[in-house]
Image: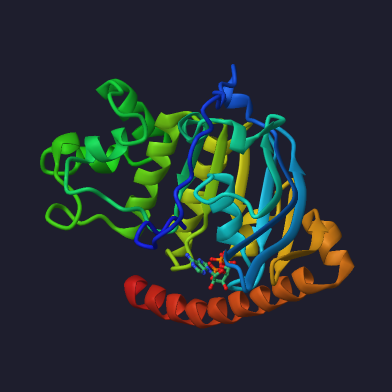
């Protein structure tokens, strides 16, 4: 979501920028996009007038075809780029009037692919809140349900992970990201669902951890598997930089538009995968019980 390798114009704080400091981050912050437009290069608009409101503590899911602008919308909220037109407000304040540091301190990102540093697992989790005491790191790991796995690592929390250390699985890396987010204790959670498939059991259990972490906080998630957002308070469907549909899962299905089409297509694909996998599991059961 945040590809740092691309060159980008620098976002600067105003001299009189204010600090975003919600008194109760665990209750979330309200987010509002009003007529937001954006282009990476002038000849190619990417967001063409996006408006929505996310009340504090509620969840918004963003879906849409590849290239429709979902990640861009998140990058703008993180103020990784400035909006071209319109405004983004957090708790009623235009994010251009806030310090980037205070804004980002209230946001935790659980990205598609978590980057691990070649350092200890404790350091990798602590990255969410540098200087946090070990007891808090362990509590975050417990909440992200990775604590028990860490205890099996050769040097437990002091085990070096990453490229030159212990390699973690995709699911474990996601749990590190969740632990980082928990430790950060942000008002806003930004989730970018992994496209790469984890196995169904891991996926379900990670979803469970995530929904506990996000409880009560304002959550914006980019979803690829629609089954993960059935309970979202609000869903927007982006297509070519515009919101083409919005509503709850139920109302979007009733509308019978793009969302309903995506939903039915996914159900069919899952059904196909299940019948294929089901047949395989049955035969494996037969082998193990024989
Ligand atoms: N750094 C960039 N520079 C120039 N163009 C970009 C950049 N990032 C994204 N784009 C373009 O902006 C459009 C929207 O991209 P974005 O990543 O927001 O889509 P998305 O909906 O998140 O897609 P996906 O589901 O594939 O992740 C695409 O056409 C993409 O090629």
Percent of width and height locating residue 88: 68, 43
Q: Is residue 156 above or below residue 170?
A: above
Ligand 1 occupies quarter:
bottom right
Of residues 64 and 271, the one nearer the viewer is 64
Q: Is residue 131 above or below residue 40?
A: above
**Quarter of the image holding residue 235?**
bottom right
Q: Is residue 153 above or below residue 43?
A: above
Q: Is residue 283 left or right of residue 76?
A: left
Percent of width and height locating residue 210: 52, 43
Q: Is residue 51 left or right of residue 160?
A: right
Q: How is the image coloured?
A: rainbow
Percent of width and height locating residue 243: 76, 62
Of residues 50 and 193, the one nearer the viewer is 50
Residue extending furthest toward the top: 23
Quarter occupied by the C terminus: bottom left
The residue at 20%/53% (across/down) is 162
Q: Is residue 23 left or right of residue 37?
A: left
The residue at 48%/78% (across/down) is 277
Q: Is residue 106 left or right of residue 45?
A: left
The residue at 55%/59% (across/down) is 71
Of residues 197 and 4, the one nearer the viewer is 4
């Amino acid at each position: 979501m945040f590809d740092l390798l691309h060159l980008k114009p620098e976002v600067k704080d105003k001299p009189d920028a204010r600090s975003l400091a919600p008194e109760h981050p665990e209750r979330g912050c309200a987010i509002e996009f009003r007529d937001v437009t954006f282009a990476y290069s002038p000849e190619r608009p990417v967001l063409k007038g996006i408006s929505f409101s996310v009340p504090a503590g509620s969840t918004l899911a963003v879906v849409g075809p590849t290239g429709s602008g979902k990640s861009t919308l998140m990058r703008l909220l993180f103020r990784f780029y400035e909006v071209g037109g319109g405004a983004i407000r957090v708790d009623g304040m235009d994010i251009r009037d806030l310090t980037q540091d205070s804004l980002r301190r209230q946001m935790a990102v659980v990205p598609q692919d978590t980057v691990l540093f070649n350092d200890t697992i404790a350091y990798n989790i602590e990255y969410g809140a540098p200087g946090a005491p070990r007891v808090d790191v362990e509590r975050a790991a417990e909440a992200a349900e990775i604590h028990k796995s860490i205890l099996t690592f050769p040097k437990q929390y002091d085990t070096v992970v990453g490229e030159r250390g212990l390699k973690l699985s995709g699911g474990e890396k996601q749990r590190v990201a969740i632990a980082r987010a928990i430790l950060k204790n942000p008002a806003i959670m930004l989730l970018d669902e992994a496209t790469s498939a984890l196995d169904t059991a891991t996926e379900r259990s990670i979803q469970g951890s995530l929904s506990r972490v996000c409880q009560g906080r304002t959550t914006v998630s980019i979803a690829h598997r629609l089954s993960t957002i059935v309970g979202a308070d609000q869903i927007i469907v982006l297509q070519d930089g515009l919101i083409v549909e919005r509503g709850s899962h139920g109302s979007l299905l009733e509308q019978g538009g793009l969302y309903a089409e995506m939903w039915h297509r996914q159900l069919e694909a899952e059904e196909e995968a299940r019948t294929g996998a089901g047949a395989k599991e049955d035969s494996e059961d037969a082998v193990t019980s024989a």
